């Protein structure tokens, strides 16, 4: 069967090939990419990596400063050390209270940061899959259309492409 299109003969095989290519470009590559992400257990790995990155940046609170009086007056002379022996607790108690409140606030902020990251991890991970599939639509279509015989670099390094998309501004702003 031949269709006339302005001097260019369009055969049934050409129409079938164009349909097959379009199907793989719009549906097949996306489907295979999603299956690859599921097969590598991307959602769980991604959420664990996000929480680990938040935990990695956490610096444990320092112990409260002691000997504030000695830091202020102890180096002056024997009279300064004697003054600290007698009234040092009056200097150390407020300093310990202030540092204790600061440590509590720091731990509270860390817990909030951790819960915020955990709450938004799913949307960031889904965003990474969507961005990667959109960014590498053609290589995934070629991979699918060739019945997985042709594999380009984005397909072979799919996990690193997902991580790159996760850290991209498009997905980093999700959480």
Image (tube, rainbow, N blue to C red):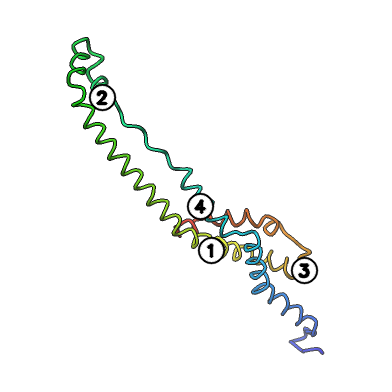
Q: Please tell me whether residue 81 is drawn above or below residue 24 in the rendered image.
A: above
Q: Which residue is identified by label 2?
A: 68
**Real-space CA distance between mark 1 and mark 4, rounded to the nearest whole angstrom:** 13 Å
Q: Where does residue 53 sit, x and y in percent of width and height?
A: 50, 47
Answer with mark 2 or mark 4, whichever residue precedes in sequence. Answer: 4
Residue bearing mark 4: 50
Q: Where residue 148 sits: x, y (%)?
A: 76, 65
Image spot of residue 154 (x, y percent): 67, 58
Q: Specify whether 13 is left or right of 29.
A: right
Residue depth check, mark 3 versus mark 1: number of the one nearer the observer:
1
Disc nearest the viewer among 3 and 2: 2
Outermost right residue: 1
Task: Tell me the SS state at disc 4.
Answer: helix
**Furthest residue to the top?**
78
Q: Quadrant of the C terminus?
A: bottom left
Left or right, residue 63 beside residue 84: right
Q: CA distance from mark 2 to mark 1?
A: 51 Å
In the rendered image, the vertical position of residue 73 relative to residue 109, given as above or below: above
| Label 4 Cα neighbours within 10 Å, binned few <14 / some 14-19 / many ≥20 | many
User: Of marks 3 and 2, which one's residue comes earlier in the chain?
Assistant: 2
| Residue 146, numbered circle | 3
Residue at x 45% of width, y 43% of height:
57
Other residues around mark 1 within 10 Å, as few (<14) / some (14–19) / many (≥20): some
- Say which residue label 1 marks: 126
From this viewpoint, is residue 60 visible?
A: yes
The answer to the question of whether label 3 and label 2 lie on touching residues, with beta carbons closer than 8 A, is no
Question: Which badge, 4 or 3, is on the more N-terminal residue?
Answer: 4
Asked if marks 3 and 1 touch (Cβ < 8 Å), the reply is no
């Amino acid at each position: 069967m031949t269709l006339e299109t302005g001097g260019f003969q369009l055969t049934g095989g050409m129409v079938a090939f164009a349909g097959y290519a379009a199907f793989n470009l719009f549906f097949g590559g996306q489907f295979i990419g999603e299956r690859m992400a599921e097969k590598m257990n991307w959602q769980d790995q991604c959420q664990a990596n996000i929480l680990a990155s938040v935990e990695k940046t956490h610096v444990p609170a320092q112990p409260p400063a002691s000997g504030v009086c000695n830091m202020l007056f102890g180096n002056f002379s024997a009279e300064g050390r004697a003054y600290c022996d007698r009234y040092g607790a009056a200097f150390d108690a407020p300093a310990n209270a202030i540092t204790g409140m600061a440590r509590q606030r720091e731990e509270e902020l860390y817990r909030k940061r951790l819960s915020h990251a955990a709450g938004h991890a799913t949307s960031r991970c889904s965003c990474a899959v969507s961005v990667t599939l959109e960014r590498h639509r053609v290589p995934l279509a070629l991979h699918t259309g060739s019945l997985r015989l042709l594999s380009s670099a984005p397909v072979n390094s799919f996990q690193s492409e997902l991580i790159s998309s996760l850290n991209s501004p498009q997905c980093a702003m999700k959480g």
